Amino acid sequence: MDVIDIRDPESFAESHLKGAINIPMGPAFRQWASAVLDEQAELFVIALDQQQGMPAVEMLLRAGFEQVVGHSTWDEIKKKPSSQVENLPVITVMEAARQMDAEAEKALYIIDVRTTAEWNAGHIVKALHMPLSTLKDSLDSLPRDSDIGVICGSGFRSSVAASYLKKAGFARVKNIQGGMQAWNTYCR
């Protein structure tokens, strides 16, 4: 079963159920869910509150995910003694720039999950372009023994991608806070 946490990236990064994938509720929710989820998988939704949870379940059902087996709030989940909680490391663009230029074995491997049009409009020279829509088919091309920083436009898609990578067994994943908006402001 895939656990989908629809809270904002900051709340998810602070603490979430181990193995959960962060797909923040918003205008691109269905698109991001389709990019990383298997339509045949059983899904369980974790939301900030009930008002957020039911619309997410309905959107998933309309998007073709027929096996939504339930939903709950984060407050209810974290009270259960059996809940294994973890966090998603978040780094600033300045930290990412420093780590990217570190010694080879300690260097940060940056994945840019924006669209091709966004990439072509400007990107980090050392980054690997891997649009979110291609991520689940590209896992074999990523180094499992390196620190991986994930970046997008603002930090939402990168949270989706970073949480997906963690679930897929990439233990050293970090979300780059603020995305290319912050990079262009502080690191150009």
Image (cartoon, helix red, strand yellow):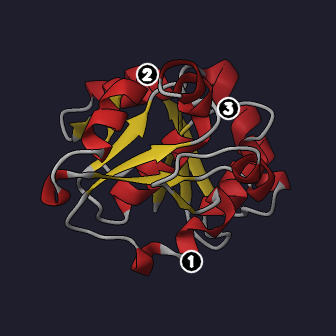
Query: With respect to residue 176, does 173 lie above or below?
Result: below
Q: CB under 8 Å between callouts 1 and 3?
A: no
- Residue 98 image point, x, y percent: 28, 34
Q: Earlier in the sequence, mark 2 or mark 3?
A: 2
What residue appears at the point 42 percent right and 30 percent down from the top-left corner? Answer: 12
Q: Secondary structure at mark 2?
A: helix
Looking at the image, tell me whether mark 1 or mark 3 is earlier in sequence order.
3
Q: Which residue is mark 1?
A: 137
List the residue tagged with mark 3.
25
Q: Tag 3: residue type?
A: Met
> In the rendering, at what x and y percent does residue 142 appear?
38, 71
Q: Find out whether the residues at labels 1 and 2 contact each other: C-beta distance under 8 Å.
A: no
- State whether residue 165 appears in this view: yes
Residue appearing at x 75%, y 53% in the figure = 120
| Element class at badge 3 | loop
Residue 11: mark: 2
Residue 61 percent location from the top left of the image:
78, 54
Residue drawn at x 59%, y 27% is 184
User: At label 2, which amino acid type do we have?
Assistant: Ser
Q: Give the vertical position of 178 relative to 165 (above or below).
A: above
**Which label lies toward us, 1 or 2?**
1
Q: Quadrant of residue 10?
A: top left
- 53 lies above or below 125: above
Q: Specify which label sits upstream in the sequence, 1 or 2.
A: 2
